[in-house]
Image (tube, rainbow, N blue to C red):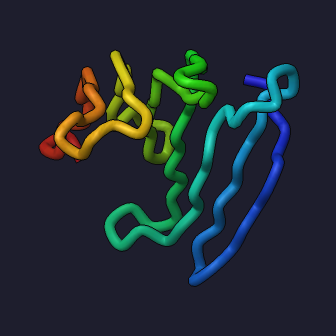
Amino acid sequence: MESNIKSSLSGRGDEFRVYLDPKSHLPAQTEILEDDPLEGDSSYLLRYADWRKVDQIVMPSSLRYELNGRALQEEQIKSVQNNALRSSPIRLMSRRRFDPSNT
């Protein structure tokens, strides 16, 4: 994926990088670099995809979480209600791939 760094922030030993898609200028991914107690120096990555406009707000409907290049979880957001009552949750369809017994 070709993307450009938009912002890089550091604090408490962690570094956050936000990458933008050069065509749409929307976030393509966020990377967090930190010293994980179990994994050591680690890269947590959240990839955004399938951006959709919902009530004038553009948001990703596909999220993929990775740790050091390994897929942890993928989420497909099926529906969203902005400014909804608290009893109306966002509906997620998640495909979990992380198996702690494999670590």
Q: Position of residue 103 (x, y in %)?
A: 24, 47
Along the horizontal axis of the image, is 36 left or right of 102? Answer: right
The answer to whether 69 is drawn above or below residue 14 in the figure is above
Name above or below for residue 31 compared with residue 80: below
Residue 86 picture location, percent across and down = 24, 46
Q: Position of residue 56 (x, y in %)?
A: 62, 26
Indicate the position of residue 59 as horizontal and vertical percent values: 56, 29
Q: Quadrant of residue 29?
A: top right
Residue 2 versus residue 49: which sits nearer the camera?
A: 49
The answer to whether 101 appears left or right of 6 in the picture is left
Q: Residue at x 44, y 46 (%)?
A: 67
Which residue is rendered at x = 56% and y = 16% of the image?
50
Q: Is residue 85 above or below residue 48?
A: below
Q: Residue furthest bottom?
A: 12
Considering depth in this image, is 77 or 15 the residue closer to the camera? Answer: 77
Residue pictured at 61% horizontal, 46% vertical: 30
Q: Identify the image quadrant of residue 92.
A: top left
Q: Nearer the viewer, residue 44 or 102?
A: 44
Q: Residue furthest left?
A: 101
Q: Quadrant of the N terminus?
A: top right
Between 4 and 90, the residue placed more toward the observer is 90
- What is the tally of numbered marks visible in this picture? 0
Quadrant of residue 11 within the rendered picture: bottom right
* In the displayed structure image, the side of residue 74 where residue 48 appears, left or right: right
Tell me the residue at 57%/57% (across/down): 32
